[in-house]
Every structure is written in C-alpha cells, then in structure tokens.
Image (spheres, coloured by chain):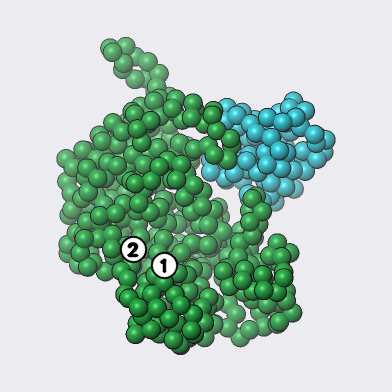
Chain colours: A green, B cyan
Amino acid sequence: MADFTMPSLGADMIEGTLVEWMVEPGDKVKSGDVVAVIETSKGAIETEIFVSGTVQELLVKVGETVPVGTVLATIRSVENVRHPAESASESAMPIPQELKPVTVATSRPVATLKTGIVRASPAARKLAADQGLDLADISGSGPGGAVTLNDVQAAAGMKQAGQESGRVSRGFDPASMRQGIAAAMARSKKEIPHYYLSTEINMKPAQQWLAEENARRKINDRLLQVVLPLKAMALALRKVPELNGFYKNGEFNQSERIHVGVAVALRGGGLVAPALHDVDSKTLDELMQDLNDLITRARTGMLRSSELTDPTITLTNMGENGVEGIFGIIYPPQVAILGLGKVMERPWVVDGRIEVRPVMLASLSADHRVSDGHRGAVFLNTLDKLLQTPEAL
Amino acid sequence: MSRLSKTPEQTHAILRRELENIAPEADLSQLDNDADIREELDIDSFDFVRYIAAVCDALELDVPELDYIEFTTLARAEKYLGTLG
C-alpha cells in the first residue's frame, strides 16, 4: 500500500486544493501518470504520481483544501518508483521541493492553439469524447482558458458550471506568484554564497550554421537560436558536473541526469522555470520540439508537478529583452544558473585584425559551497568552445 | 511558397486573428498598424515565430526566416503578404 499525498510545489506552499481527480478507485496507474489537478495559491498544476499500482480509495474530495503531506488517495502499489528528480541524484536526496520558481497558470483566456489543439485536462477530454462533444465548442474556465471537467459537464447539461461545491478558480494569481518568487530569491540570496563569472562568445559560427540549417527547413521545423546554447550548456555540464544538482541538508548531491529549467516570462508578470529533461542526450530538433511544448504549456497553465521540481540547473535568456547580460540568482536547492544576453555586433580580434562579430555575453552564477571559480571558468570556456562548432551539437 | 489567394481585407483579418490568439490579453483595437507588435504586446521570439507560423498556416504559405522582420508590424506584414499574391 502506498499513499499519494498533497505535494509541496513550492517553498511557500503549505496547502493545496484538489481541483480535479483524473482517476477513480480501481483504476490502474503507473509512475508518471497525472492523477489530479492541484490548485495552489499560484495556479493549477497537473500532478503526477510516482508509484505504480491500483487506486484503492480517494480520500479527499474535489474542492477540499488540505495541508501539504495530507494523504489524498491510497494506492495498492505494485512498486515504488523514485521520483525523476530523486533518481537524477546519485543519493537518496529528497525531492527538491523547496525550489519552486513558482507556478504556472496564466490568465490568458485562450484554449485553442494555432494548431487547432484545444487545451483540456485528460478527464475533460475523455468526458467530451464520451458525450460526443467537440472541445473547441466549449468555453474553458481553466488556466489559460483550458477546458476543465466542470466545463464539459456543464456543456453536457450534467450540471451547471460552478455548481459543484468544490469548484475553485484555477486562475493565476500574480500577487501570489510574486510572493513565491520573492521567497525563493530571498532564501537564495541569504543562504547561497554566489560567485559570478562571464565570458563573451563569438556567435558567428552558430548564427551562420543556424541560418543555413533553417533555410532548408519549413517554418514549423526551424530552430530558435536558444537551443544551441541550451544543448551546449548541457554538454559542458558533463565536464563540470558539480554545477548540476542540488544542495540540501548541508551537502551537495550531484545529479546524473541534466534537466535544465528554462525561465519563461509570463506576460502580465511572473516567471516559471520548468524542466527540459535529459537535455544533454537530445538532438537539437528534439530540444526545439520539447521547448515548443514546454513554453506553450507554461503559458497556458498546463505544466506538470515534476516539471517544477526536476530542474538541476537553470537557463535564463535575457537577450530577448535587449539587455547585454544577466547575473542570475540561483534557484535553491540548485547550485547554478546560466544567463544569456543579447547577441550584439562587437569589435572582435581575428588574426591580429579587428572585425565585427555577433557576440553574446554568457554569465554563470554558481554556489561557492559546491564549486569554485576555476571550475566555473572551465564550464564557460567549454560552453564557448562547443558553440564554435554548432554542427557537432 | 504558394501564391496568396486572399484579399487584403482577408489577410488583415487573419493577421489580427492570429495575433489575438498569441496575445489574447491584449486590446488589439488600440494597436496601431505601424506599431512593432513585439514591443507593444510584449511578444518574445518564441511567440513571434508562433505568430508567423500561424499566419503562414492560415494562408497556406511558407516564408524564409530572413523575412520574419516583415511581420513586425501589421501594416508591414500586410504589405509583404500582398507582394506574394
């Protein structure tokens, strides 16, 4: 028997509200399945389970608010499976739950993407199919306009939307998100002795390669420049693994897997940094595809709990905002964050001559309890070197 | 790249519709046709490319990456797409 408990999805989270069950007693579940939607003060999160077995009993009803750690359901377990973030670590280090670059859902009222895909929870999708309803015809009240089970039930005439006693709003709360960011960043500044390094990287090879590659591709298959440093940083981490992992309870637990938290700014304020998994072992095309999926879901409030707890390092790209560089604040319990600035034309010495080159400032903020400047410099130099041969990424 | 078979009015409507899908929180009625949509609507490169891709899907055409700059304003995009017809 195993318990499925209210997870901690942020250092400041003390309770959560069950918005939706996606399983019923008797259903078989496997590790990684989304079994519930949990509303925190910062939004709604599709929450996964990390055991495999059969759902025995649902102990908390939709609409109930309970403290972190409360047993939500009991599972007749076949096996206990380690949480991805836990298994990414060599030791039995606890899940990095104190992290939490914050929540997810935005207030953007769009559920239909350009591809025609309608955002909807699995339970809503299933019920709509059972009822012969087209999700595109249903007005979504979930995060980002996503269609929820209640919406489908209302559309099916099964009940009025909002009638259910447990109905809660799934909107994103900018004030709460700001509080979450503040708590995590204040803790980081207080506890982590940061050191900062930066280097200018000649991006001409990367830009040339990317332009030629994209010229051969249809618009939907093209790569964004950010996937190049994303892959390069993951490969560089193989060489400097002490930047990849978590510092908890007075010790560093290096992660064997490289899950990069990608900082995604939400229009209207707020920030999330969900994980792209196993970045070092993926192709650029796979990373672009994953990035498309992740950013879209981050902006429509459809992230999963594990994506918020898994990042082993963070990448923040401020080049978008036209700034030359950023020296980021580490998300605890991570131990490093890489910042990218805007690619700008700069004088560059080539064979004793000054030429114009597109140059990007890459900056590293790292935890001095775990690494020192020398190793940080090795990381940045490796990153630079890798970006000079983009075809090899 | 296929020839554009839409009228200028239809193209304009598609541009606005897809922009609304990308930035649904924005009040497009206040958007100047000559304003840079990236600055006015806080659209990053990811959403900017999504917007162009959506417009291209709707118009059943493809545009080279070098021409993305033509989509920075509604007026410029309308003019550019008009040249493809």
**Residue A129 seen in the current view:** yes
Q: Is residue B28 left or right of residue A243?
A: right
Quadrant in the rendering for residue A384: top left
Percent across and percent down for residue A198 are 29, 37
Query: Which label was assigned to residue A2?
Result: none
Who's the residue at 41% across and 72% down the image? A30
Q: Which residue is identified by label 2?
A: A84
Residue type marked 2: Pro
- A170 or A87: nearer the viewer: A87
Q: Quadrant location of the C terminus of chain A?
A: top left
Residue at x 58% of width, y 83% of height: A166
Horizontal and vertical percent position of residue A226:
43, 40
Residue type at tag 1: Gly
Q: Are marks 1 and 2 in contact (CB under 8 Å)?
A: yes
Q: Quick one: label 1, few (<14), some, or many (20+) residues within 10 Å?
A: some
The chain letter for the residue carrying disc 1 is: A
Left or right of A276 in this view: B85:
right
- Looking at the figure, which quarter contains the N terminus of chain A? bottom left
Q: Quadrant of residue A308?
A: bottom left
Q: What element does badge 2 sit on?
A: helix
Give the labeled residue for mark 1.
Answer: A32
